[in-house]
Image (cartoon, rainbow, N blue to C red):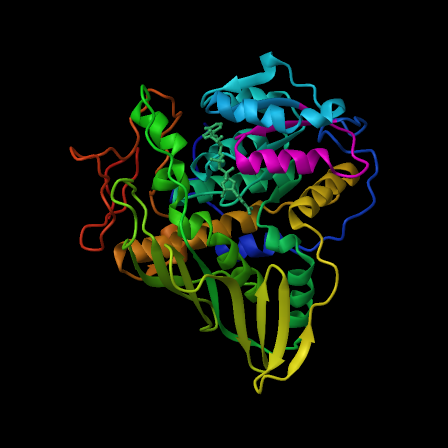
Amino acid sequence: MTAPAGPSSPVLSRRDALRATGATVAAATALGMRGVHADNPSGDVLKIGLIGAGGRGRGALVQTLSVPGSNVKLTAIADAFKGGIDGTMRAVEGMQEKIDCPEDRRYEGLDGYQRVIEACDLVILATPPGFRPMHFQAAVAAGKHVFMEKPVCVDSYGARLVLEAARQADEKKLKVVVGLQRRYQTNYREALAKVREGLIGDIIGGQVYWNGSGIWYRNRQPNTTEMQFQVNNWYHFNWLCGDHIAEQHVHNIDVANWFLDRLPESAYGVGGRQNRVESQPSEIYDHHAVNFTYPGGVRIASQCKQFPGGDGRVDEEFQGSKGVLRLHPGFAQITDHSGKELWKFSGENPDPYQVEHDELHAAIRNDTPKNDAYYGATSSFSSVLGRLATYSGKTWDYQKALDLDYRTMPENPSWETVPPVVPDKDGNYPLPMPQTFKITSVTTPAVS
Ligand SMILES: NC(=O)c1ccc[n+]([C@@H]2O[C@H](COP(=O)([O-])OP(=O)(O)OC[C@H]3O[C@@H](n4cnc5c(N)ncnc54)[C@H](O)[C@@H]3O)[C@@H](O)[C@H]2O)c1
């Protein structure tokens, strides 16, 4: 890996990052047949690589192979475990004319990503998010277009790495889409247009929620190392998943940043674990509640939970000086403060997971600007900021947190690496507690 952008490096500030993001809603243009390779605009087959062949990687692969009119071939695939590769090859069995991925371009383990990047024009990054900054940086260094799943980082170091690689992607005219699919959903885009027209006035405050029931647990298998257990059961380890405030709730926090067109200045919150199953040792909380403060004094209250019972809620609401906007993936409505409806979304809402790939291919073919990595990084880091607040019980400033020497992913991880967190004699992992929480980096001693 190249040297990271350190705390004193000239990394992008919040405002630079927002400016660089520019307009995020690009109309899909008709597919032409140029610009496939950043360095070879005349090429026409778009070679696809997949890194992280689990549930979402498989879905994204099928979507990218299904872009109408796009000449594509899967050429290489990597997964930590053979099961992911085999399952994915089975999932695309019916698309043989789009598959050119022999056994010797199927890589098992943690270092296959480099080989996949070499073998493709467009790479899908869908491993657990802890690996994302390292994989994104490698893809950009190699001059490849990228579709990457959210979140795109789980700590300060990773956020800086992605922001710096985003800048390099622009220089190389690479195209990048991030799987924050609300940005590709027609009801969200139309609602945003109404907000920008002034239908709810100035946004004064809002609430964003991902309150669900639970998450899977993958039990320890015989004859596996601690590293293999954690990578397989990645949702329960912060260095791999960033806790569920980053892993899932990033979608809603991103909507707040997007609609406000600002990034939070600070976060303050509480969280904990009250319902995780005792026989399933885990390092993450099962609930977080955070107040984000934005420039202009706007407050967004965020909640996420992962335990059964109570009302489930995954949506966003913004109060403005003239009205209120309510949003969720199938719905968008604006009322005035008396409850009278001013607007309601009623159009077609095509599958945003497909639209992401349609628009990515169009940008590649037509060489039009497309780089979601800035907002991918700043929204992912906003959710990390929320986690810092709930783990520490303290108010965290966005820019100070971004500049921290806070790195959770070991350099060059392999199956021999000792994970950053190991179980105690009873098999349990330490739970972050405000009284004892410290920012630590896997490569340096604690700094605060
Ligand atoms: N946008 C969405 O709505 C959405 C939905 C689901 C998942 N996701 C995101 O997709 C990512 C993957 O989630 P998933 O549900 O597919 O998980 P998953 O566990 O099903 O798949 C992850 C795969 O990555 C593999 N892997 C782990 N480390 C690897 C490495 N270093 N190199 C190569 N392969 C590695 C695992 O073996 C596994 O097959 C996550 O970031 C998640 O947040 C996004």
Locate residue 327, reporting x and y percent: 58, 66
- Vertical arrangement, residue 8 with respect to residue 92, above or below: below
- Vertical arrangement, residue 293 with respect to residue 138, above or below: below
Left or right side of 445 for 75: right
- In this view, the residue farthest toward the left is 425
Left or right side of 279 for 345: right
- In this view, the residue farthest toward the front is 309
Magenta span contains residue 68: yes
**Residue 177 lies in quadrant:** top right
Tell me if I can see residue 142 in this picture: no
At x 62%, y 37%, the residue is: 60
Closest to the observer, 252 or 138: 252
At x 39%, y 36%, the residue is: 234
Magenta span contains residue 204: no
**Residue 337 lies in quadrant:** bottom right
Q: Which residues are magenta?
A: 46-74
Quarter of the image containing the N terminus? top left
Q: How many marks?
A: 0
Closest to the observer, 49 or 143: 49
- Vertical arrangement, residue 247 with respect to residue 65, above or below: below
Locate residue 383, reporting x and y percent: 43, 53
Closest to the observer, 349 or 257: 349
Locate residue 49, reporting x and y percent: 62, 27
Tell me if I can see residue 75 in this picture: yes
At x 60%, y 13%, the residue is: 103
- In this view, the residue farthest toward the top is 104
Locate residue 305, reporting x and y percent: 38, 57
